[in-house]
Amino acid sequence: MYDFKLPDLGEGIAEGEILKWHVDIGGSINEDDPLVDIETDKAAVTIPSPVSGILTSISGEVGDMISVGDIVASIDDGSGVKVTVAVAAESSVSEEESAALLKTLTDDSFPVHAPASGNGKSVPAAPATRRYARELGVDINKITPTGPAGRVTMDDVKKFSEGGTTPEPAPEPESENITTADEIRAHAEFAAHAASTIPLLDIEPLPDFSKDGPVEIEALRSIRRKVAHKMVTSMIMIPHVSHMDEADVTLLEEFRLKERSKREGQSGGKLTLLAFVIRAVTFGLKAAKSFNASFDPFKGEIIYKKYYNIGFAVDTGKGLMVPVIKNADQKSIIQIAAEIEKLVDDARNGTIEYDDLHGGTFTITNIGPLGGTALLATINYPEVAILAMGAVQEKPVVRDGEIVIRKILPLTFAFDHRIADGADAARFVAEMARKLSDPGLLLLET
């Protein structure tokens, strides 16, 4: 019997909401088959079964919250031996195997599996990759992983099955988790400063609104709670200033729609206006490094980032997500368009990977598809700037002394006034508008 507990998922995640059970109590399940969908404040994820067997009990119904360390489900694997699978002190696996299991459970797609038997080393891999290895008759635990977080990839399995050797894995990026005593102390000092340096802040409890009429109460959970936390932090920590301008995108829209029609049926995503804006923003950030930065108020330091990871806001129906296009300066408009389409689908389907939601250096929010002429956006802390796009509208404008109808894109640029001034923002937006007004300028720099 396996009692599968929800492990420490890192990044401050303490609980998740049960969205869907894929198997009923008494039903059979195979190893790596979907067991339960759980939504944390990061994203919704599907947790596969660690073993094959019969589901004998579950931790709760849809809508219930489950905390780290709680039993997710019990599965009768026919062994007659009760084993608790969790990254905890009572676990029956070695420290090395526990570390491997934790990596597996914190993997983007949450691939879950039991530790390898004997002295074999258990490696993290997605369910599809593990099935692929079984189909090829390959022992996945003998493969050197090259994927992020030490995962075995499909390509690793293929090369190994063909008799080749997998390359040495790239060094993993430093964890964002607070691990050392110095980091914990620094974090505590930062929080203490933030809490003690807001004079006259005295938040009173809300009155009992039910005394005045019927009410409905809903707990703030998962993604919505994370959004609330980020927005409050941003508005308290950052002195926002907004600069507004317009871009004449008449020629760009003609070019975009013509190319979009020509590319219909080909691989890659649809050529949206957002893809061109991301391209223009990326080049603008290279010339205006202050807006591709973060600010440490207690050290009095500005951290300029030499990489360009552009996030864009997505309305998922369950809350706001900001997928990130990594190294946007190294990608063509076609590649950016394809990534936008994939990331939007993943975010709305609840299948987006953890890494795709982190590491952004600048954010764009686009209310154009929903209508609206302008938006005063909140900066995505700890970034220092954000661009809001309104809906493209046909407007009468004066060109060479004549009134003509042009397609106009309203832009609102919010920035951290501690690291830049209004003149910096005006120059940044004006140059971006100039590039958007002439597709040739974007293509030349591409």
Image (cartoon, rainbow, N blue to C red):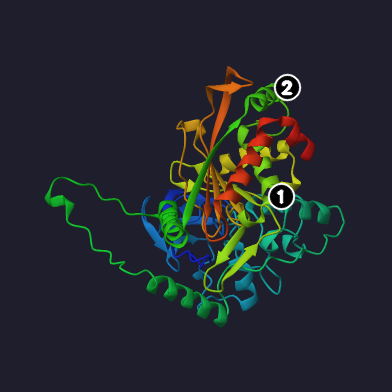
Residue 126 point in image, percent of width and height: 64, 54
Disc 2 designates what residue?
262
Q: Nearer the viewer, residue 337 or 401?
A: 401
Q: Is 316 above or below relative to 96? A: above
Q: CA distance from mark 1 to mark 2?
A: 37 Å
Front position in the image: 119 or 148: 148
Looking at numbered disc 1 in the image, what kind of residue is underneath it?
A: Tyr
Foreground: disc 1 or disc 2: 2
Residue 416 appearing in the image: yes
Expressed as whole percent of the image width and height from the top left, the position of residue 191 reads: 44, 73
Q: Label 1: state its secondary structure.
A: helix
Mark 1 or 2, nearer chain start = 1
Foreground of the two, 93 or 249: 249
Relative vertical location of residue 71 with respect to residue 212 in this rendering, above or below? below
The structure residue drawn at horizontal position 70% and vertical position 30%, both measured from the top left corner, is 438
Q: Which percent across, then down, holds residue 225? A: 40, 55
Say whether residue 435 is left or right of residue 224.
Answer: right
In the rendered image, which residue does mark 1 sit on?
Answer: 132
